[in-house]
Image: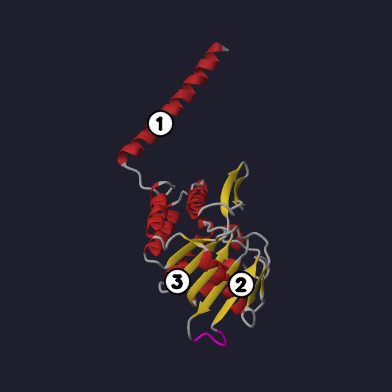
Amino acid sequence: MNNFITNNGSGTLNKRLVELIKESKELKFLVGFFYFSGIRELYKALKENPDVTIKVLVGLNVDKTNLGIIELADIESNVSDEEKTYKFLQSVKESLNKDDFDTEEFYEQVRYFVQLIREDKLLIRKTFNPNHSKVYIFKLEEGQVGRDKLFITGSSNLTRVGLTTQEEFNVEISDYGFKDAEDYFNSLWKIAVPITEDETIKQRLIDLIEKDTLIKDITPFEAFVLVLKNYLDLVGLNYENIRCNCIW
């Protein structure tokens, strides 16, 4: 197998992660941001291995620009844990409120990840300092031929394009360096700000996803008001067109 993964001739990182997730008992991911566009790519593999636990260490936040959502490395040396938590939660909100997520399939996937968070199978922490590293660590189930652990590191972030279509360069390593890579992850994890392990923050995250993003349930009255608003906007637009034509 080619140790280099470029999302090109060597295959996609998404395909390799799916293969490894199915064989793993523990996952540790250090990424710039926990984009749901990336984790949704791993949805089926995680569902097929319900006993696996995944730790996600988030290194950056995101922000919106005129060109879309970007990674944001804030200066956080004097920022409290509460402020870091707030920025992380706002980051999740920004990343989920995108039109391309407005699908039935995505609603199902996000609800599954919320379930994993509730069951403490998906653990998320925010790094104490901004971190742009990408490391994917796998503890494999017993019975794997010749190895019980490996890691992948390189340029791919946990985004749909980073895992699939965007040209990247990643390397899979199993014969050396694993202990150093895991020690690095563990050292960052130890001082990171807990998100899902703090019951108050966990509930805030779940509430935010379920109530302040595109997957929130709306009441019949809210649906009626939305339809009425769209209708009135359309009527108003047509009225303005007629008025302008009459004036001219």
Q: Nearer the viewer, mark 3 or mark 1?
A: 3
The residue nearer to you, when weighing 125 against 1, is 125
Q: Find the distance from the CA under tag 2 to the CA under tag 3.
A: 18 Å
Q: Find the distance from the CA under tag 2 to the CA under tag 1.
A: 49 Å
Query: Residue 80 at x, y = what percent?
Result: 51, 53
The residue nearer to you, when weighing 215 against 29, is 29
Query: Residue 231 at x, y = what percent?
Result: 41, 30
- In the depicted structure, whether residue 151 falls above or below residue 144: above
- In the depicted structure, whether residue 211 falls above or below residue 110: above
Give the residue at mark 3: 53
Range covered by the magenta-colored residues: 143-147
Q: Callout 1: few (<14), some (14-19), or many (20+) C-alpha neighbours within 10 Å?
A: few
Give the residue at mark 2: 152
Q: Are marks 2 and 1 in contact (CB under 8 Å)?
A: no
Q: Quadrant of the C terminus?
A: top right
Furthest residue in direction top, as rendered: 247
